[in-house]
Image (cartoon, grey):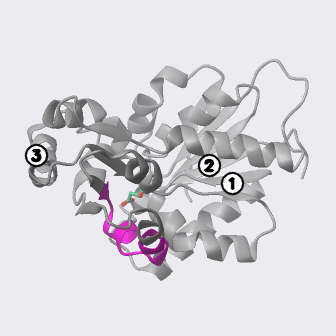
């Protein structure tokens, strides 16, 4: 691997842009390649083997484009497939998991909420993390069924979205949660809508910045941080509607190309 190769990032769709943005902010001279596998979204209801197969497909494409590190910007793919990827490829992988630890350490009501996909909440990795860090704390788990397809179709501010968020979040408020962990990379795009429901007494946590910091730490450790460059170039690809990806990534379209690719 050479330090001037790009950072590869993939997600089941546009959600991982919430992570990619943090990486671009923290590492402004690194080139990146982003894959939105929106054609196969949502991953959250698929079997573990299907999630592994899709993660392998995305990894192979990023490697064929010369990536030096791969960020799995998807909780569902991380919790189900990252061990397989690490066992089978030499490139370093960074994953994203629901941020249970900071929520469990800081809760004052002793109750935290986790909104994530079925695939994440039923994974072994999630169970072991939850057991390790949230012993003695009430963890209100909720599958965010239906949220990802709405984000994927750009329907963030719609009655359907509000209906689902109300249905998922009110039971958590009834349990007096003071921390809400967003365990899916699509959900940070819903923070304005979530905030209206939970008010300002609940702290909302997502893992985007932590993933960017970990990416920088591993690149540094492997001596792969790019040197002597003044700007970066970003290639974003989707295998579905380009306009949705363009809209989601709109604040970051300087030095970027956003294109359709069949993968
Ligand atoms: N964005 C993904 C995650 O972080 C997966 C959503 C899905 O495809 O179900 O879990």
Q: Which residue is mark 2?
A: 9
Nearer to me, 183 or 230: 183
Q: Quadrant of the C terminus?
A: bottom right
Q: Position of residue 262 (x, y in %)?
A: 55, 56
The residues bearing labels 3 and 2 have C-alpha atoms spaced at a distance of 31 Å
Magenta stretch encompasses residue 74: no
Q: Are marks 3 and 2 in contact (CB under 8 Å)?
A: no
- Asked if disc 3 is less than 8 Å from ligand 1, the answer is no
Label 2 CA crowd tier, 10 Å (few <14, some 14–19, many 20+): many
Considering only order in the chain, which callout, 2 or 3, is on the residue closer to the N terminus? 2
Magenta highlight range: 115-128
Is disc 3 surrounded by few (<14), some (14 to 19) or many (20+) residues within 10 Å?
Answer: some
| Label 2 with label 1: CB-CB less than 8 Å | yes
Identify the residue shown where x is 30% and y is 56%: 114
Give the residue at x 8% y 39%. Answer: 159
- Lower sequence index among marks 1 and 3: 1
Task: Residue under label 1, please give it.
Answer: 70
Q: Residue at x 74, y 34 (%)?
A: 31
């Amino acid at each position: 691997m050479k330090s001037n190769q790009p950072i590869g990032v993939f997600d089941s769709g546009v959600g991982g842009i919430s992570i990619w943005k943090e990486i671009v902010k923290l590492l402004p001279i690194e080139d990146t390649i982003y894959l939105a596998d929106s054609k196969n979204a949502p991953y959250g209801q698929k079997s573990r083997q299907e999630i592994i197969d899709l993660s392998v497909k995305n990894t192979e494409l990023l490697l064929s484009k010369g990536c030096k590190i791969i960020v799995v910007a998807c909780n569902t793919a991380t919790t189900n497939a990252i061990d397989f990827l690490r066992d089978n490829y030499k490139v370093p992988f960074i994953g994203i998991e629901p941020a249970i630890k900071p929520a469990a350490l800081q809760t004052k009501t002793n109750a935290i909420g986790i909104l994530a996909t079925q695939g994440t909440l039923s994974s072994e990795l999630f169970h072991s993390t939850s057991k390790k860090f949230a012993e003695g704390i009430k963890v209100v788990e909720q599958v965010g069924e239906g949220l990802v397809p709405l984000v994927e179709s750009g329907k963030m501010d719609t009655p359907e979205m509000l209906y689902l968020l109300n249905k998922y979040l009110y039971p958590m408020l009834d349990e007096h949660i003071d921390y809400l962990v967003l365990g899916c990379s699509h959900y940070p795009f819903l923070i304005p809508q979530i905030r209206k429901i939970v008010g300002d007494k609940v702290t909302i946590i997502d893992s985007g910045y932590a993933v960017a910091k970990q990416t920088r730490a591993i690149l540094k450790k492997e001596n792969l941080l790019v040197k002597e460059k003044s700007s970066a170039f970003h290639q974003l690809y989707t295998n579905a509607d380009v306009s949705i990806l363009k809209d989601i990534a709109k604040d970051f379209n300087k030095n970027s190309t956003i294109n359709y690719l069949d993968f």
